[in-house]
Every structure is written in C-alpha cells, then in structure tokens.
C-alpha cells in the first residue's frame, strides 16, 4: 500500500548541524498521527522536512508515492496542507484574503474565483468559527483567533493530507476541543490524513490513532496510544514519573505526571 507520506532515511537540520539523521517514518493513510516529544527534540524539523519546507541533507520523502522534491510546488500544495509553528501573515491582510490564498494552488494563473472556492472558503471559516472575522486584519487578532484563521487557510486548501504544528497552541480549552473535534471529523468523514505535533499527551492519546514519540532527533516508539503511552515511555522520553489511567469515556490512556524522574531510566 502506498503511504500518503513517507520519509526514507532522511537527514535535516540547520547549517552544519543535523537535527534528524537517518530517520524513517511512514504515515498511515486516513489516520491521525501525533508527533510528541520534549522541546527541541526535532518534531518541527521532521514536519518541515516532510513538507519540503526544509531541504534534506540525505534521504528522500515520498508524497503519495512520488518523490516530493521532483514535484512542481503547485502539485505539492494540492496534496499537502501545512500549518507551520509560527506562520507569518502578509502585513494588513484580512482574514478573508488570507483564507482565499488556500485556494491559489487550485487555480491557473489569472483564473477567477469560482463558486466552489466561495463554498470551500465559507466552510473553512464556519468550521473554525472565524466567519465573523472575515474583514478584520489578521495582525489585529488575538493569538487564538489567529490560530483558527490559519487552520481555516489549511482547510480551504482542501488537501487529502494535513500537517499541523501545534494546532491548539494559543487556544482556550473549549476551542482546543473544537479544533480537535473538527480534525477528527475531517479525518472520519472526509478520510483526511492528519499529522500533528502536540505537547498535550492526553489530547494526542484521545484523538490520534498513532503516536510517534521522539527524543533527541530519533523516534523512540511508534504505535497506537494504548501501546506507546505507558509510564515507561513517558519516563524515557520526558524524564517524568507518571501514572496512566484510562479515559472514562474512551479508555484511551491518560497521563498524570507525578514529578521529574531522578532514578536511572534503565531501572524502570
Ligand atoms: N531555524 C533554525 N535555525 C537553527 N536551529 C534551529 C532552527 N529551528 C530549530 N532549530 C534547532 O533545531 C532543534 C530542533 O528544533 P525543533 O523546532 O525541530 O524542535 P521541536 O521538537 O519542534 O521543539 P518544540 O517542542 O520546542 O517546538 C533545536 O535544537 C532548535 O534550536
């Protein structure tokens, strides 16, 4: 089976320093995959590398089975939507104009905006609760409003695969659930493949069917939350002692940190 996205022995970093080196990952089609791990372990670097936002020092990335580096940019943008960690909007752009940019990869030069564009933009604004912000300049929004507008842009792009770097940062708890429910819905109903970076292990456990746990630029464990999110992995990846209890509704593992771990990890 062809994976929507696959990294083969990739190396990437900044300047001469490689953050990831010889890393393999296969993203399952039609699933939600969460990348978790401590600050600076390389989650964003991995996401940017597979999205072609960062050059590879070695290895290859396959998007729907084809070498992403050999693909025209427009073709990549039709297949892959990405929400980077700190996206920067053009100065004074309005919400409506920013979300409209999500439609650009789908049109030829000079082609007019169509009814389908209008529908997809309206849907993206409605799904993210940003329709009433449509005429506001993006740089005057709150952090949470802005984050939802960027998600709307990624949705308007209407790609089969979405990569989202910490999509719920800046969001209050209700909006976090709203965005995660929206992603779950897109995954279930539209079959979208979703890869997200998350610092919230419990949220990742609830929504993702695959957890990829990273440390020091390497994948330490990968699999369903029930298999990956145990006390041993949390100790190994984050250096924390914790208890794991099943979520009362879903039975998915939920982590309660007890404190930093002082004992050597090998003795766990
Ligand atoms: N633009 C950059 N230039 C130089 N070094 C960078 C750059 N971006 C990231 N790094 C470094 O690469 C390493 C991995 O960073 P990365 O952003 O991939 O980590 P992360 O796991 O996403 O972290 P966080 O959870 O803090 O967002 C870090 O040491 C970081 O300082």
Image (cartoon, helix red, strand yellow):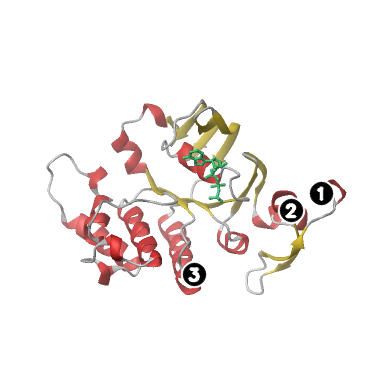
Q: Which mark is residue 177?
A: 3
Residue shown at 20% from the left, 66% from the top: 135
223 in relation to 120, above or below: above
Residue shown at 34% from the left, 51% from the top: 88
Mark positioned earlier in the residue sequence (3 or 2): 3
The location of residue 204, given as percent across then percent down, is: 58, 59
Residue shown at 32% from the left, 66% from the top: 141
Residue depth check, mark 1 versus mark 3: number of the one nearer the observer: 1
Mark positioned earlier in the residue sequence (2 or 1): 2
Mark 3: which secondary structure? helix
The location of residue 218, given as percent across then percent down, is: 64, 39
Q: Which mark is residue 76?
A: none
- Asked if the residues shown at circle 1 and circle 3 are in contact, with their CB atoms under 8 angstroms apart, the answer is no
- Asked if the residues shown at circle 2 and circle 1 are in contact, with their CB atoms under 8 angstroms apart, the answer is yes
Pointer 3: residues within 10 angstroms few (<14), some, or many (20+)?
A: some
223 in relation to 75, above or below: below
Q: Can see residue 159? A: yes
The residue that disc 1 covers is 265
Marks 1/3: CA–CA distance = 33 Å
Q: Quadrant of residue 79?
A: top left
Residue depth check, mark 3 versus mark 2: number of the one nearer the observer: 2
Mark 2: which secondary structure? loop
The residue that disc 2 covers is 239
Q: Quadrant of residue 105?
A: top left
Q: Can see residue 9? A: no
């Amino acid at each position: 089976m062809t994976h929507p996205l696959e990294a083969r022995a990739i190396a990437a970093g900044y300047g001469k320093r490689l953050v990831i080196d010889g890393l393999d990952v296969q993203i399952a089609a039609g699933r939600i995959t969460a990348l978790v791990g401590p600050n600076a372990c390389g989650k964003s670097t991995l996401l940017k590398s597979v999205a072609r936002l960062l050059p590879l020092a070695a290895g290859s990335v396959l998007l729907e089975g084809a070498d992403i580096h050999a693909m025209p940019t427009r073709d990549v943008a039709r297949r892959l939507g990405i929400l980077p960690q700190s996206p920067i909007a053009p100065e004074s752009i309005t919400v409506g104009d920013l979300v409209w940019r999500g439609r650009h990869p789908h049109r030829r030069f000079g082609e007019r905006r169509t009814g389908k564009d209008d529908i997809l933009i309206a849907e993206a604004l409605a799904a993210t609760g940003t329709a009433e912000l449509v005429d506001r300049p993006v740089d005057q929004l709150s952090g949470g409003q802005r984050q939802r507008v960027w998600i709307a842009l990624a949705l308007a792009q209407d790609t089969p695969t979405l990569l989202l770097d910490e999509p719920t940062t800046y969001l209050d708890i209700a909006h976090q659930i709203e965005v995660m429910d929206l992603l779950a819905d897109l995954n279930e109903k539209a079959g979208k493949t979703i890869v997200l970076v998350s610092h919230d292990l419990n949220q990742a456990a609830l929504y993702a069917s695959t957890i990829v746990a990273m440390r020091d630029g390497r994948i330490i464990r990968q699999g369903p939350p029930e298999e990956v999110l145990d006390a041993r992995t949390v100790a190994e990846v984050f250096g924390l002692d914790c208890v794991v209890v099943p979520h009362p509704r879903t039975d998915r593992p939920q982590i309660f940190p007890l404190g930093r771990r002082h004992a050597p990890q090998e003795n766990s």
